[in-house]
Image: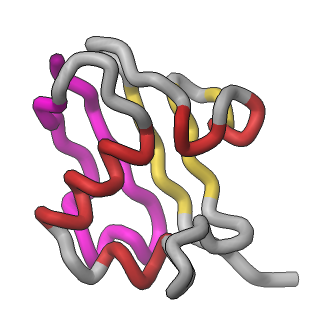
Amino acid sequence: MKVTVRSFATLRDYMDAEFAIEIQESATIRDLLTTLIGRYPKLKDEIFLDDGTLRDFVNILQNGRNIAFIQGLDSILADGDRIALFPPAGGG
């Protein structure tokens, strides 16, 4: 199946801004991130802590909905899904 991935802000320094990617049926967000890290190794340190947990304030949206309100990294993907990756942002 095919999903579209968009990256924002500083994540664009490590990966393409938008692209479609083929991934196996019943894949999860976690599976997708593993695939993306295989393609863009520097991405790992930007979104995960050393223990493999998602960094605070990294936001991942699946079709416009934050995965924190679905099933987190275990959210199941469907063909045609649009995934948006946002790094932590600071400011004031």
Q: Residue at x 41, y 33 (%)?
A: 28
Residue projecting furthest to the right = 92
Q: Is residue 77 left or right of residue 69?
A: left
Q: Residue at x 18, y 70 (%)?
A: 40
The image shows residue 69, relative to residue 14, as above or below, that is above
The image shows residue 37, relative to residue 73, as above or below, that is below
Picture quadrant of residue 5: top left
Task: From the top left corner, tell me how far across and down residue 16 is, in percent.
Answer: 20, 60
The image shows residue 10, relative to residue 65, as above or below, that is below
Q: Residue at x 51, y 86 (%)?
A: 50
Task: From the top left corner, tell me how far across and down residue 42 is, in percent.
Answer: 27, 82
Quadrant placement of the C terminus:
bottom right
Q: Is residue 88 left or right of residue 84?
A: right
Task: From the top left corner, tell me how far across and down residue 76 is, in percent.
Answer: 46, 23
**Which residue range is magenta in the image?**
1-23
Task: From the top left corner, tell me how far across and down residue 47 is, in percent.
Answer: 49, 71
- In front of the other: 45 or 17: 45
Q: Is residue 2 left or right of residue 83?
A: left
Numbered disc total? 0
Residue projecting furthest to the front = 51
The answer to whether residue 2 is magenta is: yes
Q: Is residue 40 left or right of residue 85?
A: left
